[in-house]
Amino acid sequence: MTVLTRLSSVLIIALTVMFAGNAQAALPEFRDIVKKSSPAVVKIIVEASGPRAAQGQPGPEEIPEYLRRFFEFRGAPPAPHQRMGMGSGFIISDSGLIVTNNHVVEGADSVLVRMSDRREFNAEIIGTDPRSDLALLRIEAENLPTLKLATNEELEVGEWVLAIGSPFGLDYSVTAGIVSAKGRSLPTENNENYVPFIQTDVAINPGNSGGPLFNLKGEVVGVNSQIFTRSGGSIGLSFAIPVSVVRNVVTQLEEQGKVTRGWLGVTIQDVDKNLAESFGLDRPRGALIAQVAKDGPADDAGLREGDVIVAFDGKDIPTSSHLPHVVGLIAPGSRVSVDIMRDRKQRTIKVKVGGLDADDSYSLRGGDASEGQGGRLGLIVTEPAAEQLERWGLTGGVQVREVVSGGPAAEAGIMPGDIITLIGNVPVKSVSAFDKAVEKLRSGSSVPLRLMRRGTPMFIGLKLAD
């Protein structure tokens, strides 16, 4: 072997060791976080009468035989009238306050908190908030370990995070991963959307619900709440409630026993490419107001159908789903600035935010209309039934009877049965008003149409032929 060959071999070995060392140095270290934080993470065991499904864990028949010995179900399963549920939680104050998920304790007759040192305490439910899926408990104990809630929202996509909980009853299991996305919208069964979820690939399973999600500083940045799965187990799609929501909800539950959110009183939708062009936006963004609640905060401030909210209280609104996240965290009664696009110009309006529990029903009355059609749009329209107008809270409009194949309306997705109430910024109270509005449209232009479809208000961007 020549001297040059030997030097090359030494260099390769040195580089290999260096890169291996750098790769090892780049990996996060979790041991200190686990040692310091685990004592403040608790297991929550719930008993409920009746047929309540066990929220935190599967039934014994769903658990593989070789794992059953780890679970609460030892011997015969609980009687049908007394179901067991299980989840996780964590202590946030030495006075015994514990954060968990609402769905862990919902419908509970009794709640037992078990700590890592095997001490057990009966817990009092201070308050719950189904909209955020959070609950606040309290236990009577001294010298309790606590966790710190992060005070900033600097969590970044790609950042390492750590979870501690009791998946499938396996106490104080630790899993780690990265933040996959932020601001995920997961509407509830009531179509409410007030939580900008953190998406991670941390392995979360039944029993982790209510447990903490940590950053590498050992601070709680979220509360594990949901998973997406087709098998019942983790597939790398888990969602946590961000600490900004946790702080807001916990403070209100502790002080008032309930949660009040900011409320604007609008129905909104996303802005697509055609709508963006028709409203004068440089790209699809913002939340388009499709309906305004009469005498609600938006109505009182002068916001109206067709306005596009591009910023609220100084925060950009990239999509419609972001608006409830921002509004919900604002204290009712606060006056904030709202940046909107109206008549292709941006302007700012001051709004006094209302409370979510305010009456947000629409009290509009029906009106009259006559028959006609608008040929430029490829639509044949007619008079809607007065009962339908009243049922949907409309003061007028024209109902689409037929959509001409290949016309602008067909390409835009307008359907028979839709009731058109606005063309551009021109209200359509009758067919004559519809015809006049259509006549004034410029060839080749894009125009937003507001309509009601099966009782749901929406805007559709329509582009006229040149």
Image (tube, rainbow, N blue to C red):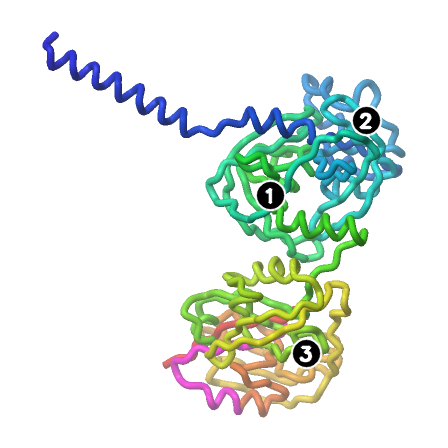
Coordinates of residue 260 in the picture (x, y in percent)? 74, 59
Q: Identify the secondary structure beneath mark 3.
A: helix
Q: Please name the amino acid that badge 1 sits on.
A: Ala
Q: Is residue 154 above or below residue 302?
A: above
Q: Is residue 449 magenta?
A: yes
Coordinates of residue 363 in the picture (x, y in percent)? 75, 77
Residue at the location (54% across, 65% down)? 314
Q: Please name the amino acid that badge 2 sits on.
A: Glu
Residue 260's disc is none
Q: Earlier in the sequence, mark 2 or mark 1?
A: 2
Q: Is residue 80 magenta?
A: no
Residue occupied by mark 3: 300
Residue 10 lies in quadrant:
top left
Residue 16 lies in quadrant:
top left
Residue occupied by mark 1: 150
Coordinates of residue 200 in the picture (x, y in percent)? 54, 40
Residue 120's disc is 2
Contact check, label 2 and label 1, Cβ < 8 Å: no
- For label 2, count other residues whose C-alpha is less than 10 Å away and answer few (under 14), some (14-19) or many (20+): some
Observer-nearest residue: 24 or 378? 24
Residue at the location (50% across, 42% down)? 180
Determine if residue 369 is in view.
yes
Observer-nearest residue: 440 or 210? 210
Q: Earlier in the sequence, mark 1 or mark 3?
A: 1
Residue 39 lies in quadrant:
top right
Coordinates of residue 125 in the picture (x, y in percent)? 82, 42
Q: Quadrant of the N terminus?
A: top left
